[in-house]
Amino acid sequence: MANTDFRKDAVRPRSVYTAHSYNQEESSLSTFQDYSKFLEGGLGQAELVGASGWQPPWRAPLQRKAPFYPGDDIFHADTWRELEVTDGIGAATYNVSVTPHGTVCMRLRDRVKVDMTIDGAVRLTNAKNNIILALSRSGASAALIHPNGRVYQYGSRVEIQARHQQGNNKYAKMWYKGVSFTAEQCALVYLVDAAGTRTTTDTFLDMSQDFTLNVFYNESRHGPSYVNEALSLLQAVQYWLTDDGIDNWIINNVRVSQTSDGLVRVHRCSHKYQLRTSPSNGSASITSPFLHCTASLGQTQHLFVRRGERRMHFDGNSFIVRNAGHSAGFDDKNQLKVY
């Protein structure tokens, strides 16, 4: 039987590259004259033609823009020294100045900075220990950023993040239902209320950003138009030195003091609101009618928050919340424990 070759009769499917003529489509590109609107930077036709040394914008070196309020996040020693000015009030170890955005700035010893708005909001920065405290104009909001954790109080709620050395951070929220808490490596959320401890569903704020700036600026007037008003507050600054070596200032009814070892206290409204931090031991505290919280570094490191009968305590390993006579939390092995 003769072999028959059927390959000659078979019809091959046409390839997509042979079924279409791309030469015809290329001719239609001449109808698009202006490509500059598709390029970042708005380059015109003259720059596109003959620009042998031009690089696309996405290959250009990254240029970091300065923050809207420069100097708000200063944690570098060299940067701190560059921002010091020689015109100060009193001794050369501190200075008081008005910033271009209408706030009063005090730079004290041991890299401690106090910012105040003309409405009385306060932001206290301890650059040596990476600690920031803030109090709003009305006092209804407060914030703490500390190496041991973060606290954000707004109205009747308090959001807490306790930083664990092994990365299993703990979260808690004090609100009208009680105290909710969980951990990053825990799939459940627990609630401690008057009935005891039980599971629940709840959400927690993302506290990875610097929320102290919102507390400081939101309720207060600020900007270049308030520089003159801030200058009038600067001219009325009162300063005195006590016999035991404590520096004291009064600016816009806010009292600031610093001891010889660097401890800074900020009082407002006759000690009803108080911020304090110490560069020597990394401690910080906020006291107001709405909240009391403390934090410290060293051998007795801790983070403590109290609002009414609701409490939270974290010592770096164990995490405990208390409410209405009931207590629960996570032990040093990250296991739930009901007390």
Image (cartoon, grey):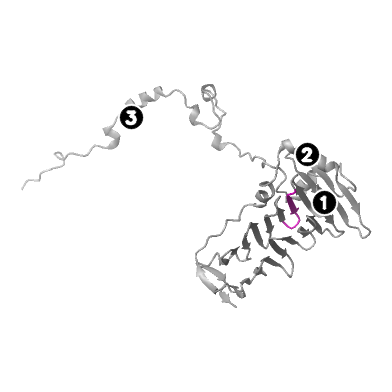
Q: How many marks?
A: 3
In magenta, the rendered stretch is 120-130
Q: Quadrant of residue 245?
A: bottom right
In the image, residue 19 lies in the stretch drawn in magenta = no
Q: Give the residue at mark 2.
A: 229
Secondary structure under badge 1?
Answer: loop
Secondary structure under badge 3?
Answer: helix
Q: Are marks 2 and 1 in contact (CB under 8 Å)?
A: no
Q: Nearer the viewer, residue 93 or 4?
A: 93
Q: Quadrant of residue 269?
A: bottom right
Q: Identify which amino acid the numbered label 1 is placed on.
A: Leu
Look at discs 2 and 1 and give the one toward the viewer.
Answer: 2
Q: Quadrant of residue 22?
A: top left
Q: Give the residue at mark 3.
A: 22
Q: Give the residue at mark 1.
A: 108
Which residue is depicted at the point 79% across and 52% down?
111
User: From the image, which quarter does the C terminus lie in?
Assistant: bottom right
In the image, residue 126 lies in the stretch drawn in magenta = yes
Residue 131 in the image: state x and y as whole percent: 72, 57
